[in-house]
Image (tube, grey):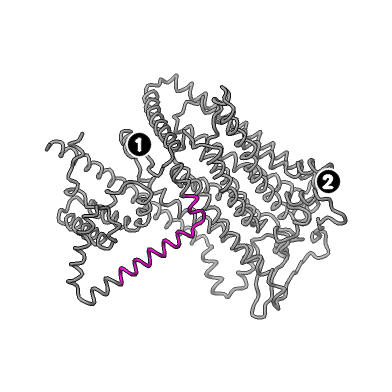
């Protein structure tokens, strides 16, 4: 064993300073800073190993790689080199001698380059110090490792994303209306149905003496004094704003801002997930390599807490047991007879039918709760404060109960389906994601079934004006209530469930408390919670433009709630999800939520008739007509260009080019996999040759 590992690395591998640094927090920071340099080295490395037929080309590539790495080492400060003090002094003296041989112009360039590099490093340090929760995230990383760190980093990403979305909605929708009294602008509020039943929008503001708890009800439900404010869609009943130098089309700005925040979210998520996707694409470990990676490089050197270190040890042991169990199940699967396969597949079919029945029952309960809640609100029958609040929040309560009960049921059912441990976790999470995100779709479907249904008679205004004079505001209120109720539930579970559980386990020693144990900080479940809330935010931002700001404040507070819960009430999970240490899983689930959010927004914009009594689209049958009407006002050349972009010929051409690009990326990924496999074979060959020489 020693003879294999005592290889003269300088003969085979270029001198890389990263190989001599311990995997501490400082080295991780250095690796992040030099990621760009690392990409250049990898591209040069691919050039070195890409062709095995030309020895001359390979030798020149290796020489060029050595020259590049040597120049990079010379550019680095002496204190950053992973060398002893004696070696650093020698390097400093060597650089001083080289500097004396340079001309005045060369010395000036060298000093200027050094100053610019110092300024760049200082600027990067300043910018990194301005990051939100920088010290808190470092503290979490030091105590609990990189797995839990990824959750809080993901939470910070959502805070910044919602802030950017709110700035888009504020600058293009709210700000033009806010500054109208301070400018000489004129407002155009043309309503082609003025005086008809379609244009009636009764005020929901309470008149006379208002009881205090009614203000609380309005604050939690978005009704009353909040309904006709900047918070909801119905307040923006402005078509165009006439300025002395031009006209601002608010309807078009509202539609384009909605498209913009969806595109910004998509591009940002795809950009952040690209790194993790590349790693998962080329990663193809066999069982032996998987065991070696966990044993020799599975430890997280960022952990400094003894208790967390014990949990990390238990986690590694659990992963090794899981891998061994998967290997055992693979062997058993290979030995199964046809009768065993029929039994297992029949059992899985029955259990999946049962799961579908449970999901159907949950969705039907959400539909009934939404219908009943809307009927009670339409009747305006006031019982008491508690019952009125329950009627307002009945859909949210049913959705929360379904999201709480179904994961527990799924975790029991999966034990009888005879899957591998890793696939059990993934399949359970897929079911939970489907349940959480589809419940929002069922809520919207139940609302739209009432909005577009006028009974036996056709809808006079294109929607049910008897129930919803401004249906967009009503949908926005439902999204607002879901957001508020989700935050209340997260805080209530932390205070009323996790904290008492911690006290019972700590101060009441018994068999029950030992069996119950401390609350585990389950990363996938916590991620599903915030993805669920973010999906609601994406859907509701069209109907409630201030909702992204509310979600920003919500996630800002959730960060501290979860941090307090992690430090005081919970412990890291001893059975971590394997993708929890990378943001690729989180962003993948978030991308699913964004795809689901685009569906109801697209349907409401393009299919359902816009309200005639509120909002900026009172002059259009649908919201999408604001864009087509604006295109018709453009010059003929611009119209021709836009029509060409929306034609079938362009769509087919774009689809073909996209397919070719996709095939190219797939082929490139396959080539990378082959190169990685060849490099692994070379490493094995070098080790074998060295062992034979010894």
Instruction: State the mark number for residue 379.
Output: 2
**Res 241 → quadrant:** bottom right
Locate residue 46 relative to residue 648 in the image: left or right.
left
Magenta-colored segment: predominant secondary structure: helix
Q: Is 130 included in the stretch rendered in magenta?
A: yes
Q: Is 406 included in the stretch rendered in magenta?
A: no
- Identify the magenta region: 112-137
At label 1, counting other C-alpha atoms closer than 10 Å, the crowd grade (few under 14, some 14-19, many 20 or more) is some
The local secondary structure at tag 1 comes to: helix
At label 2, counting other C-alpha atoms closer than 10 Å, the crowd grade (few under 14, some 14-19, many 20 or more) is few
Q: Nearer the viewer, residue 298 or 197?
A: 298
Residue at the location (48% across, 21% down)? 343
Please state, as top left, top right, bottom left or bottom right, where the C terminus lies in the image: top left
Q: Position of residue 86 (x, y in %)?
A: 21, 55
Q: How many marks on residues?
A: 2
The residue labelled by disc 1 is 294
């Amino acid at each position: 064993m020693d003879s294999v590992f005592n290889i003269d690395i300088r003969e085979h591998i270029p001198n890389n300073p990263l190989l001599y640094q311990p995997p501490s927090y400082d080295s991780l920071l250095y690796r992040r800073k030099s990621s760009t340099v690392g990409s250049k080295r990898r591209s040069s490395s691919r050039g070195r190993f890409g062709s095995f037929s030309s020895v001359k080309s390979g030798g020149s590539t290796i020489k060029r790689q050595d020259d590049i790495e040597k120049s990079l080492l010379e550019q680095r400060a002496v204190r950053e080199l992973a060398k002893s003090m004696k070696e650093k002094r020698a390097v400093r003296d060597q650089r001083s001698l080289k500097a004396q041989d340079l001309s005045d112009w060369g010395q000036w360039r060298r000093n200027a380059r050094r100053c610019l590099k110092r300024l760049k490093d200082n600027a990067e340090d300043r910018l990194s110090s301005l990051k939100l929760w920088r010290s808190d995230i470092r503290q979490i990383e030091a105590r609990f490792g990189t797995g839990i760190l990824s959750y809080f980093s993901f939470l910070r990403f959502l805070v910044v994303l919602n802030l950017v979305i709110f700035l888009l909605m504020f600058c293009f929708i709210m700000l033009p209306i806010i500054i109208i009294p301070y400018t000489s602008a004129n407002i155009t509020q043309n309503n082609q149905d003025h005086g008809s039943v379609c244009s009636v929008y009764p005020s929901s503001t309470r008149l006379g003496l208002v009881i205090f708890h009614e203000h609380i009800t309005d604050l939690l439900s978005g009704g009353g004094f909040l309904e006709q404010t900047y918070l909801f869609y119905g307040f923006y009943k402005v078509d165009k704003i006439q300025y002395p130098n031009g006209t601002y089309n608010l309807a078009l700005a509202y539609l384009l801002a909605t498209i913009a925040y969806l595109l910004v979210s998509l591009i940002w998520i795809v950009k952040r997930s690209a790194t993790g996707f590349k790693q998962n694409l080329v990663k193809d470990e066999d069982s032996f390599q998987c065991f070696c990676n966990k044993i020799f490089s599975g430890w997280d050197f960022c952990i400094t807490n003894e208790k967390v270190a014990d949990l990390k040890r238990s986690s590694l042991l659990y992963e090794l047991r899981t891998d061994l169990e998967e290997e055992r199940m693979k062997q058993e699967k290979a030995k199964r007879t046809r009768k065993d396969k029929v039994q297992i597949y029949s059992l899985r079919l029955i259990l999946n039918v049962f799961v579908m029945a449970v999901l159907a029952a949950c969705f039907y309960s959400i539909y009934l709760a939404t219908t009943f809640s809307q009927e009670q609100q339409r009747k305006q029958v006031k019982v008491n404060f508690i019952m009125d609040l329950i009627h307002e929040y009945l859909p949210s309560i049913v959705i929360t109960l379904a999201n709480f009960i179904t994961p527990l049921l799924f975790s029991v059912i999966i034990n009888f389906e005879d899957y591998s441990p890793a696939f059990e976790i993934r399949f359970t999470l897929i079911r939970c994601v489907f349940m959480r995100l589809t419940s929002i779709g069922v809520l919207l479907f139940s609302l739209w079934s009432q909005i577009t249904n006028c009974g036996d008679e056709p809808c006079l205004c294109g929607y049910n004006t008897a129930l919803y004079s401004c249906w967009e505001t009503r949908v926005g209120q439902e999204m607002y209530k879901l957001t508020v109720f989700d935050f209340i539930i997260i805080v209530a579970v932390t205070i009323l469930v996790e904290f008492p559980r911690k006290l019972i386990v700590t101060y009441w020693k018994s068999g029950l408390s030992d069996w119950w144990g401390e609350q585990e900080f389950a990363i996938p479940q916590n991620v599903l919670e915030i993805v669920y809330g973010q999906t609601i935010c994406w859907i509701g931002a069209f109907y409630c433009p201030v909702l992204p700001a509310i979600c920003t404040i919500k996630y800002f507070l959730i960060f501290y709630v979860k941090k307090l819960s992690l430090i005081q009430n919970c412990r890291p999970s001893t059975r971590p999800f394997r993708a929890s240490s990378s943001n690729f899983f989180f962003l993948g689930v978030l991308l699913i939520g964004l795809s689901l959010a685009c569906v109801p927004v697209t349907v409401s914009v393009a299919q359902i008739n816009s309200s005639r009594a509120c909002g900026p689209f009172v002059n259009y049958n649908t919201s999408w007509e604001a864009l087509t009407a604006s295109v018709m006002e453009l010059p003929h050349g611009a119209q021709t260009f836009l029509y060409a972009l929306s034609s079938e010929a362009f769509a087919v051409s774009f689809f073909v080019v996209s397919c070719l690009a996709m095939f190219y990326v797939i082929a490139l990924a396959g080539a990378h996999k082959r190169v990685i496999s060849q490099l692994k074979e070379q490493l094995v060959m070098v080790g074998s040759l060295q062992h034979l020489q010894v």
